[in-house]
Amino acid sequence: MLPVLLNLGFIKIYTFGVFLVLGFFWAIFLLWKNIRLTSFKEDDVFDGLFLSMFGAIFFGRLIYVFLNFKDFGFNLLKYILINGYPGISLYGSIFGGFLVLYLFTNSRKLNFNDFIDYLISPIFVMMVFGKIGAFFSGAEIGTKTNFLLKIKYVGFDGTRHLVGLYEGILLAIGLLLSYRILFEIRKERYYKGFLLKFFLWFLALTIFLFDKIKENHLYFLGQSLDFLISLIILLTISFHFVYYFRSGILSFIKNYGQKIFKTIRIRTKKKVRGGKEKNP
């Protein structure tokens, strides 16, 4: 892996940082394209974006420090110096960012559910670049494996899963789906705010699938915090989706059931006729 992309002696350019910057600019570009479809003011949108980013970093770091307080103690410098003492809670960042954004939209008298739909696909962009950057920089290490797709990490024994790449690819699929759903929301086929639930559900699904093959975890009561939260979110929102799409699901089951019944009935009749022909 390549933690340092370019070493100029007096300055080092880190691979993960480069991917984060690229993700940020592509996310900003997509957000700008999305907002052009709306009546929201660009000042409101980008003010909300930067405030929510600050909230995401603050709460993500706060949760991480709280769960690893024995390593940080009351040293405020350790709290602030993320490069020297790395670590941030993913879900702490996500919920913290959404909380700040919710408070911001209320203060500007904006509709949060309408507003958030246009931010989800840019958030997916950031996460895709972040996960792929974590893979190439070696920031996320997979567990040992003899699977066909494997890689050797510097400083770790054995070959390991490409977990960052797996998550990045799956989140890229979520990005494409979220962008398509946005236009379905604009056609009023889904309710406003639907994309927020979709984002949380898809992220939870991604973490749930790959958390077990990650080497490093943020633990709570001896269990992976990300895995526990993902499981709760996945079950909760899945039940919501089943209830919301219940008419479509029941219709599908009914139509599919009728087709199966007709197929079985036709085959039964053919067998009966064939038996009669053999026995004149």
Image (cartoon, rainbow, N blue to C red):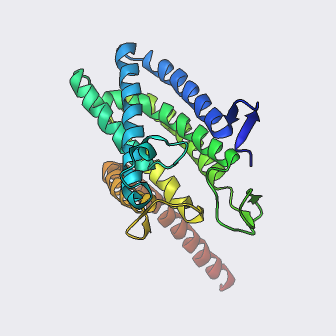
Q: Is residue 264 left or right of residue 76?
A: right
Where residue 99 sits, quadrant-wise, is top left
Observer-nearest of 125 and 53: 53
Which residue shows up at 40% across the image and 63% down it?
A: 228
Q: Quadrant of residue 162?
A: bottom right
Question: Which residue of the protein is positioned furthest toward the bottom in this rendering?
Answer: 279
Asked whether the viewer can see residue 251, the reply is no
Residue for point 57% across, 24% down: 25
Which residue sits at x=32%, y=31%? 101
Front residue of 180/20: it is 20
Q: Along the horizontal axis of the image, is 275 left or right of 88?
A: right
In-image side of 114 versus 219 (left or right) = left
Q: Split into 4 quadrants, where in the image is the C terminus? A: bottom right
Residue 153, how many percent across, how many down? 73, 57
Query: Looking at the picture, how far across and down is residue 46, in whole percent?
Result: 41, 20
Q: Eyeballing the image, is 210 above or below 102?
A: below
Note whether 44 is above or below 73 in the view shown.
above
Residue visible at 74% across and 49% down in the picture:
1
Can residue 42 be seen by looking at this rendering?
A: yes
- Residue 128, relative to residue 230: is it above or below? above
Q: x and y percent of residue 241 in the render?
A: 36, 51
